[in-house]
Amino acid sequence: MQQQDHEGRNQVQPRRPDRERGSMAVEVVLLIPVLISLLLLVVAFGRYVSVRGQVEAATRDAARAASLERDSVSAAAAAQQAATASLPATAVCGPTVVGGFAPGGTVTVDLDCEVSWDGLGLIGLSGTVDVHVGSAAPVDQYRGTS
């Protein structure tokens, strides 16, 4: 198909095949759900990383609280209280495990939590994921213990 421009020259215009009309719309319709699913997976991963960071902070706080106590029983109670105060609502954790409490030693705190995927059902994620975090803090060697 040829047309003349304003100066009288012939121009060849590319002809679009009729069989490709609307193909871009079909591609977009097929691609949008894939992109939304990918976005939701990124949100789910971000949520996991965020909650894991919060559980790590709670474990660190619990180890620090335990290291300030004078005996292992009060250290376990202080660790449990500190962990409970710092944990996010979406994490359900078992009791804190405290070990190694001795003057000059290192107290360790372990937390096992289940993080819920509630609210992310649009991409088929349901249930929980397990998060295991441990932390340690030094106990002053000159601290009097009973």
Image (cartoon, rainbow, N blue to C red):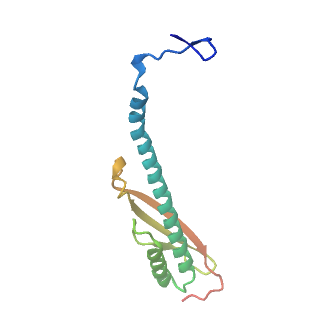
- Residue 78 in the image, given as x and y percentages of width and height: 48, 81
- Residue 76 in the image, given as x and y percentages of width and height: 47, 79
Tell me if residue 92 can be seen: no
Query: Residue lying farthest right?
Result: 142
Image quadrant where residue 129 sits: bottom left
* Closer-to-camera residue (82/101): 82
Q: Residue at x 45, y 60 (%)?
A: 131
Q: Residue at x 44, y 75 (%)?
A: 84
In the image, residue 136 sits, relative to residue 129, either above or below, namely below
- Residue 39 in the image, given as x and y percentages of width and height: 45, 47
In the image, residue 95 sits, relative to residue 16, either above or below, namely below
Q: Check the picture and name the quadrant holding the C terminus.
A: bottom right
Q: Residue at x 42, y 64 (%)?
A: 113
* Closer-to-camera residue (50/99): 50
In the image, residue 76 sits, relative to residue 9, either above or below, namely below
* Closer-to-camera residue (102/74): 74
Q: How many marks?
A: 0
- Residue 54 in the image, given as x and y percentages of width and height: 50, 66
Image quadrant where residue 21 sits: top left
Report whether 93 appears left or right of 145: left
Tell me if residue 1 can be seen: yes
